[in-house]
Image (tube, grey):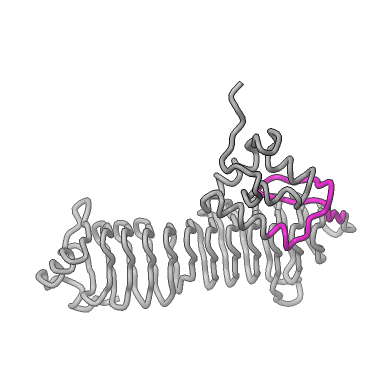
Amino acid sequence: MRLNTSYHADSQTLQRLHEISMIRFVYGADLQNCFIDTSAQIGSGTVIWPGVTIAEGVTIGKNCEIGKGAIIIGKIRIGDNVKIGHGVKITGEGYVGYNSEIGHDIENPKIGGNCKIEGEVIESIIADYCEIGKDAKIKRSTVGSATKAKHKCGIRDADVGCCVNISVDVEILNSDGESKKRTTIGNYVFLGGRIEIIGGITIGDEARISARSLVNEDVSAGTYFVNMTPGARLTTKKDNAAWYLEGNYLKLQCSIGTKYRNLFHTKAFVKCGHNTKTLKEWLKTPIVHMGGRTPIQCIKEEGENTFPCLLDECKCSKPNEKPAAK
């Protein structure tokens, strides 16, 4: 691309931009080795590394970091506290949500807030709190909030729900061998390692797919699915009294409806500061108010009846209570 003359100083204009917006140039970056269109909007506190290109029509929020040699061209909106990695190129038209980290080139980005994107994302929509690892490839798909694809995997022409765990070497195909078809993965689904899902398959909410399975027929909600031999008859077990919750497969003494599971997970996520690691730790932390039991134990034994106390919504609960030291 040939750069317009408006990119490169006119040092007085860019100096005013630097002073008014309180942009910080670091590690040798200055108004001579960065190419910033004078119409670009850049929020205060944003850090600029050497060799950065920010073109006409770009809007960048406050307290961002634009890495060395990064290129942002097009009608791109970047939220506050976003980190763009070294050498990353973002082009076209789209957005990157607040607090996200982008470590891979993206064209026409549609990335939510609090995401970490290191892998290849093409013509796809990524919701909030997702993590896409450096060896993951996502094409023409939608990915729901808090879904993790941190390892090598391929997702093509699929609609993936929220809070889905996608393990290493999972392949979601876009064909059944005869024609291209779109695949649907429900919410709170666990996909074990080395799974292959044939194009056009639908997997229901809270299903758990065993590692090395070939998924060549629809899987209903709440089902544990095993099929490790290509062409073999499916082995499935419907289990309405099971719940895959943040890496814990719970065998419930009484069933809990999907509506109440989703509501609990949402509120617990907020309670733990929108932090997945904190939520996982809280689920395994004994609570005095609950008789020294962990939230996981309470849910297994009493189901949804224990939700108000766990979420500090009952009159008898005491937030952040911990067992006394012995």
Q: On screen, 107 above or below 103?
A: below
What's the residue at 48%, 66% (across, down)?
111
User: x and y percent of residue 157 in the render?
Assistant: 64, 71
Q: On screen, 242 above or below 100?
A: above
Viewer-nearest residue: 19 or 288: 288
Q: What are the residue bounds of the magenta stretch?
A: 237-262
Viewer-nearest residue: 107 or 19: 19
Q: Is residue 252 left or right of residue 13?
A: right
Q: Is residue 14 left or right of residue 240?
A: left
User: x and y percent of residue 296 in the render?
Assistant: 71, 42
What's the residue at 66%, 44% (across, down)?
316
Name the image quarter holding residue 71: bottom left
Name the image quarter holding residue 220: bottom right
Viewer-nearest residue: 158 or 173: 158
Q: Is residue 287 left or right of residue 223?
A: left
User: x and y percent of residue 221 in the render?
Assistant: 79, 62
Viewer-nearest residue: 66 or 211: 66
User: x and y percent of residue 130 in the render?
Assistant: 54, 58
Q: On screen, 141 above or below 233?
A: below
